[in-house]
Amino acid sequence: MADDSIAVVDLDRCQPDRCSYECANYCPPNRTGKECITQRGEDAEEGGPDQIRISEEICLGETCGICVEKCPFDAIEIINLPQELQDEPVHRYGENAFSLYGLPIPIEGQVTGILGPNGIGKSTAVNILAGELTPNLGQHEEPPGWDAVLDAYRGTELQDYIREVRDGEVSVARKPQYVDQIPKQFDGNTRQLLEHTDERGALDDLVERLSISPVMDQAIDELSGGELQRVAIAACLARDADFYFLDEITPYLDIGQRVTVARIVRELAEEGDRSMLVVEHDLAILDLLCDNLHVAYGEPGAYGVITSPKSVRNGINEYLAGYLDNENMRIRPEAIGFEQHAPRTVSRSDPLIEYPEMEKSYGEDAFSLSVDGGTIREEEVLGIVGPNGIGKSTFAKLVAGKLEPDDGEFETDLEVAYKPQYIEIDQPMRVDVFLSSITDDFGSSHWNTEIANPLQLSRIMEQNLNDLSGGERQRVAIAACLSKDADLFLLDEPSAHLDVEQRVLATRAIRRYAETQDATVMVVDHDIYMMDLLADRLLVFEGEPAHHGHASQPQGMRDGMNEFLANLDITFRRDERTGRPRINKPGSQLDRQQKKQGEYYYA
Ligand code: ADP
Ligand code: ADP
Ligand code: SF4
């Protein structure tokens, strides 16, 4: 085959006992007697179904692709690699398995970011840099070992770092991507989890700045997602390491908390000779956090490429534009753009619900919420913003009629479909079975167009819910919510664990759904770029979390962003080239000027 093609077989999907080797029966080289698609032989010895292997030498490449079409389980990918990838991969997991090209470069005293989709090899790269995985330079049959790796990187910026890894001299601290898993691995309270991590004598400061004190004596399995995230970040940053790797810092945190974490990570890097590597999909935070950025691209599950470092501004701009300048590479057919001016504020649609001024308190000295009366309209996406613990869910329950206001003067029988922030669908049930139990529309062309396709569900339909990754689980939960028969759809943090591409696709799905189904959607989210792309109007919450909250009337995007960001004391400027919003340095000239003008976002 063309030298630059690879064949990838997903062994979790290949089930020869259910397909009678359709791929091999139709493969043109096989039909002329060549051994292109063959049986591995390994599994049959153990009495299992014998999965396939594909000879990359014989295979005709992507232009043939017959086996890809024939496989009923989507197990095969045949991919022409970009011509630029002439080198051998850094690592290939095995024959017809995922391969990784390029490595990020940790730099002492700096925060390095990686921006790219899930499944593209970011964790593989980090496992290599942490010394936990010895890269095989693509030679999976006879891995050449660290000395050969060092030879391969001689004369590059990674040489010294790789030598230290080989010699076991690099100490690593990691924050895992899915904090939801921590309670399954640790049985105890926050204090017990954190006390072993305090290698720098910095724990008290971290606990204070990340507001962990109130939950120090709480059991880990009773913490909320946002609390777990902050505890996990503190546990990682309290260590005394050369290399810190943080896999997503923003899920379940509000903007104020995101900005605080970004500042703490930056300070730790600037203190001295530590290198920080961060994977993050909230672009406003990534921008604020990093000194330089690697973009990752490729074909999730098949191959991934990590580019040379770029400036943060160029890296994000090129990523959004879908075109990498230095690499001369298109990574997406179209660009992702932002509204430079606030969208129009007048909506002509009918009211779905008018609610009066309301008060709700959970008891004396407990949390209380006051709500200004307002209107929610049909066909709109109403963005809900404000810190955690400020009463957003309480408000949603009032509107849904699940809670009564203190004076009892509001009744409603709206049918509300709800996607919680923290998704617990840990049943051993297949995705298709789960979704078809929710809607009779399941599988109809209408449902596929509106829900399954934009949320990229087809490849995971046959998987079990408890085998899904965080991003897959999120997409299933959004689909389940939108598939319900309801008047009002409430999505709490749909962006959590989605990569940037998936956030954009989910945004489109939600917006389209509101328009075509005459549906009203309320979305709580802390990713400001996603809110910008998603919301028609904003409902702003302010106050003192866990004590009292106040919701003003739903308002237009400009006024809403101004009120919300004024509470946070954060202004955004526009990138000159792309119009992308960027957080201003506090106290900079633009920051002061915009605050004076009261223009926090659409300046
Ligand atoms: P990311 O961190 O970008 O989500 P990963 O590095 O975790 O990506 O994984 C990249 C790809 O490598 C995935 O498709 C995964 O299935 C595959 N992979 C990861 N570990 C192994 C392994 N031990 N053997 C074979 N394939 C693997
Ligand atoms: P948000 O959705 O903005 O995070 P919530 O409406 O969930 O905020 O909660 C606001 C505050 O009310 C929190 O401090 C929470 O602990 C408290 N709270 C929520 N539900 C109850 C309840 N049933 N009883 C007592 N306090 C509650
Ligand atoms: Fe055979 Fe064509 Fe599949 Fe290659 S792409 S393995 S030649 S069927």
Image (cartoon, rainbow, N blue to C red):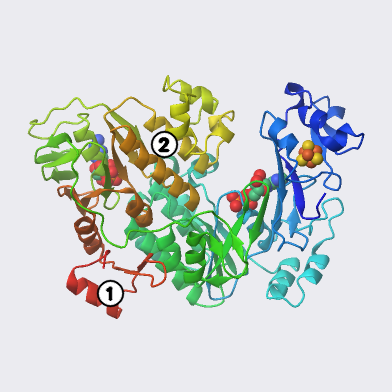
Q: In x, y percent, where is residue 249?
A: 46, 56
Kindly indicate whether the residue at mark 2 contacts the one at mark 1 (C-beta within 8 angstroms). no
Quadrant where ligand 2 appears: top left
Q: Nearer the viewer, residue 501 or 405?
A: 501
Q: Can see residue 204?
A: no
Q: Which mark is residue 537?
A: none
Residue lying at 83% horizontally and 36% vertically, measured from the top left: 28
Q: Tag 2: Cα neighbours inside 10 Å, few (<14), some, or many (≥20)?
A: many
Q: How many marks?
A: 2
Label 1 vs 2, first from the N-terminus: 2
Q: Amino acid at mark 1?
A: Asp
Q: Nearer the viewer, residue 564 or 554?
A: 554
Instruction: Answer with the quarter of the image where residue 326 lies.
Output: bottom right
Q: In x, y percent, where is residue 265?
A: 46, 67
| Residue placed under numbered mark 1 in the picture | 591
Q: Amino acid at mark 2?
A: Ile
Note whether 414 is above or below 493 in the view shown: above
Say what secondary structure mark 2 lies in: helix
| Residue placed under numbered mark 2 in the picture | 478
